């Protein structure tokens, strides 16, 4: 550190210390199977923090009337604590759903049936984070 400018050095240290360190969990769900039949992904946020969700860089939200809506922008949508959403499209090889949280204690639990994938975001010790490929 500079001895000639102690005030500047202290200001730089204060700025560095005031920047909050944000821990983050980030999960990417890739569809890599050539014969995927998944048409609906339901995501439920059981955490106390909002989640950011993006699909292939944009969004494809299902509306209440059952028709899809393409957001078209590159910003991820936010899923509030306790909320759920469904993403409906014919997911194909190369599609990706990105789920992010500002807390590193978030993990995902997955269940699936013939044509749907259920994703539960939870807090705590999720154990292994290795997910089975669909």
Image: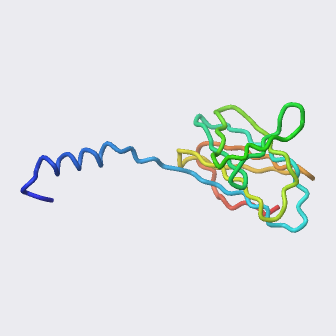
- Which residue appears at 65% of the width and 58% of the height? 129
Q: Quadrant of the N terminus?
A: bottom left
- Which residue appears at 62% of the width and 41% of the height? 51
Q: Quadrant of the C terminus?
A: bottom right
Q: Nearer the viewer, residue 15 or 47?
A: 15
Residue 60: percent from left, percent from top:
78, 45
- Is residue 56 left or right of 106 when viewed as pictured? right
- Which residue appears at 88% of the width and 61% of the height? 36
Residue 80: percent from left, percent from top:
64, 33
Q: From this viewpoint, which residue is outermost toward the front?
A: 72
Q: From this viewpoint, which residue is outermost toward the left?
A: 4
Residue 24: percent from left, percent from top:
53, 50
- Which residue appears at 6% of the width and 56% of the height? 4
Q: On the image, which quarter does residue 132 sit in?
A: bottom right
Q: Nearer the viewer, residue 51 or 114?
A: 51
Residue 57: percent from left, percent from top:
68, 54
Q: How is the image coloured?
A: rainbow
Q: On the image, which quarter does residue 38 sit in?
A: bottom right
Counting labels gives: 0
């Amino acid at each position: 550190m500079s001895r000639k400018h102690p005030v500047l050095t202290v200001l730089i240290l204060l700025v560095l210390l005031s920047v909050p360190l944000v821990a983050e969990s980030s999960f990417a769900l890739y569809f890599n199977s050539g014969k995927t039949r998944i048409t609906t992904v339901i995501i439920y946020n059981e955490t106390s923090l909002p989640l950011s969700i993006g699909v292939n860089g944009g969004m494809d939200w299902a509306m209440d009337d059952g028709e899809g809506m393409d957001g078209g922008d590159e910003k991820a949508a936010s899923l509030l604590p306790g909320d759920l959403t469904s993403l409906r499209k014919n997911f194909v090889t190369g599609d990706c759903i990105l789920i992010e949280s500002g807390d590193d204690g978030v993990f995902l639990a997955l269940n699936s049936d013939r044509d749907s994938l259920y994703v539960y975001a939870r807090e705590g010790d999720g154990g292994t984070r290795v997910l089975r490929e669909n």
